[in-house]
Image (tube, rainbow, N blue to C red):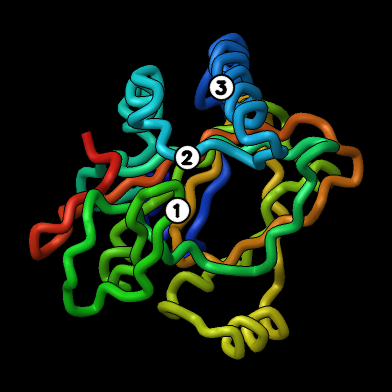
Amino acid sequence: MTRKETVDEFDKNGFEILKDVFPPERCDALAGELSAMHHQRTKSAKTRLGGVRNLLRLLPRINDVANSSEIMDVLKKHLTKPAFPVRALFFDKTADANWRVAWHQDLTIAVAERIETPEFEAWSIKEEIHHVHPPTRILEGMATVRLHLDDCHAQNGALKVIPGSHLEGKLNASQIKDRLENGNACVCEVPKGGAMLMRPLLLHASSPAENPSHRRVLHIEYATDELPNGLRWFERQ
């Protein structure tokens, strides 16, 4: 498949599953380090956390992963503009943290400070960091790489998506309901060391794991443009 065909297919579906992005031993090293951090933060919080935010700031190693040739090569093949990492999170679905995620789009970005700006709405604070809903054009220029550090299948909470739903812009609850009634959901099973590349506006969800085991995912968000009016991506290095 040519680069143009790859870009066109990704733009059409809003996602692609890629195998053998990282070797198993590198996944194991990452999983061990991230799991240790996750455990320590959960212990400090005295409650079971589903993941860890702000990893580009917390662990320099994650910057190396986010800017690695393996992931950058994937982005170059699927995007028309150079991309840079702006946020990284770690998720682990286990028997102790076996949550359900309803159908939604990823509409929020993290920024360094609150600066009132036209079309930037729904400001909030999560873990002392400012978050906001940017205009659709910002989200349309973004892509997420979900690097799987364990095998991910339907029985342990694999992501479900509605192919092509990212092409319809931001959807409200009624529109999401209509889209689910008229769209065919796809379960995205990804092997260890593989990755799922997706657009933030792609409708996605996940079910609780039927057989809970580690389902560790390093979730890295990329942008292709800087923000306007002095706004800055919080984790932009």
Q: At which x and y percent is residue 108?
A: 41, 62
Element on which disc 1 rests: strand
Tag on residue 208?
none
Give the left or right position of residue 163, taking residue 182 as reference: left
Q: Earlier in the sequence, mark 1 or mark 3?
A: 3
Amino acid type, residue under disc 1 in the picture: Lys
Going 82% across and 31% down the picture, which residue do you hit? 213
Q: Earlier in the sequence, mark 3 or mark 2?
A: 3
- Mark 1, residue position: 126
Are the residues flagged by discs 1 and 2 in contact, CB closer than 8 Å? yes
When the figure is inspected, residue 181 is found, relative to residue 138, above or below; the finding is: below
Amino acid type, residue under disc 2 in the picture: Arg
Q: Which of marks 1 and 2 is in front?
A: 1
**Residue 19 vs residue 145, the one in the foreground:** 145
When the figure is inspected, residue 70 is found, relative to residue 195, above or below; the finding is: above
Q: Earlier in the sequence, mark 1 or mark 2?
A: 2
